[in-house]
Amino acid sequence: MNWYLQSGNDSDVVLSTRIRFARNLKELPFVSKCTKKDSEEILRITENAINKLGYGLKFFKLKDLDDITKLSLIEKHLVSPEFILKRNDTGAIAINDDENICMMFNEEDHIRMQAMSAGLDLENTLNLLVEIDEKQEEILNYAYNDKYGFLTSCPTNAGTGMRASVMVHLPALTQTKNIGKVLNIVNSFDMNIRGIYGEGSKSQGNMYQISNKQTLGISEKEIIKNLKIIIDKVVEQERLARKLLEKNQIELEDNVYRAFGILSNCKKITSEECKNLLSKVRLGTDLGIIKEITDLKVNKLETYTKPGNLQKFLGEKLEGYERDIKRAEVIKQIINE
């Protein structure tokens, strides 16, 4: 089963963990300074490395992927929207069947490797990525400086080149109007908090990404330790907010069951409305109010109701209005499985 369909530690609040390393090849200029020939050479070198690396990774050039597959990769948080938009002719990815390991080539850096897992699992996810990185470093010649660490296209990524991020679901903090305070506290502890698709994106379905800012002058383990302290506090605050909501049980039950009722019976539904309703349904299942479906089904609903993944799931290309009708059908299908 793919990682994004699973549950993990603290998965009532923490949906997923992702750790990313930025790496560059010593012998070639940064992507922003690359010629077309340089970009092709980067792909040649990295594809050769992937073929030797193992882990079931398969190499694909972006220009060989169809638009629905690219959108699906964005929706699963395997690639960045900017990568697809800007690097279609020069970019490539390597991905395994479980989709918990994914690399982007010729993104902002030559290599952006990442490992993902369900729930809060920072240490194990880091260990997996370090293992992959060390094996790849035996094959490739990384750009590294004794003083500054791994050299990256953007100075804010230099040092460890590591970005650790955790996706959290915070519906109760939103409903109790405490979300602003929590977001400000996270920012004050030198952490980024962003929408579901990273920098520049908005929160959808009460989901937020929390990640480290500092990468230089700090070790990978220190980054993980600091991030975990913040995530534990956010989880604690969201659970306290849920207890507040439970004090008015009838209102809470009415709220989540109305959402479940619309999802179960609608004949058409937009992606945005679906996300907002699923946020309430997830809250209902996590609190044990909605017993008709499990968290795993909610994960499946969240994945396969997004435009790209919906079309991949059905194996057909659909226009907007058609998608809204088919989305309602798929929701019923998954709920009744």
Image (cartoon, rainbow, N blue to C red):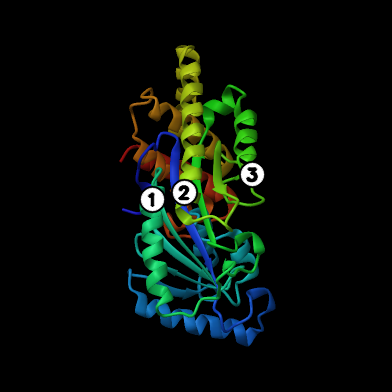
Decide: is 78 above or below 328: below
- Alpha carbon of mark 2 to alpha carbon of mark 3: how far? 24 Å
Task: Identify residue for label 1.
Answer: 123
| Distance in Å between CA atoms under marks 1 and 3 | 28 Å
Q: Amino acid at mark 3?
A: Lys
Question: Residue 19 versus residue 245: which sits nearer the camera?
Answer: 19
Amino acid type, residue under disc 2 in the picture: Ile
On the rendered image, what quadrant is the C terminus found in? top left
Dot 2 and dot 1 residues touching (CB under 8 Å): yes
Name which of mark 1 and mark 3 comes first in the sequence. Answer: 1
Measured in 3D between alpha carbons, the distance from the residue under mark 2 to the one under mark 1, in whole angstroms, is 7 Å
Q: Position of residue 134 (x, y in %)?
A: 40, 70
Crowding near pointer 3: few (<14 within 10 Å), some, many (20+)? some
For mark 1, does the 10 Å Cα neighbourhood hold few (<14), some (14 to 19), or many (20 or more) residues?
some
Element marked by disc 1: helix
Pointer 1 with pointer 3, Cβ within 8 A:
no
Instruction: Kindly indicate the quadrant of the structure image that contains residue 154.
Output: bottom right
Q: Which residue is mark 3?
A: 202
Q: Residue at x 48, y 50 (%)?
A: 222
List the residue tagged with mark 2. 224
Compared to residue 165, the image places residue 70 above or below, namely below
**Amino acid type at image mark 1:** Glu
Q: Work out whether mark 2 precedes mark 1 in sequence or the reverse, and give the earlier one.
A: 1
Considering depth in this image, is 337 or 291 the residue closer to the camera? 291
Q: Where in the figure is residue 271, as x and y percent of width and height? A: 55, 44
Badge 2 marks a residue whose secondary structure is helix
The answer to whether mark 2 and mark 3 are in CB contact below 8 A is no
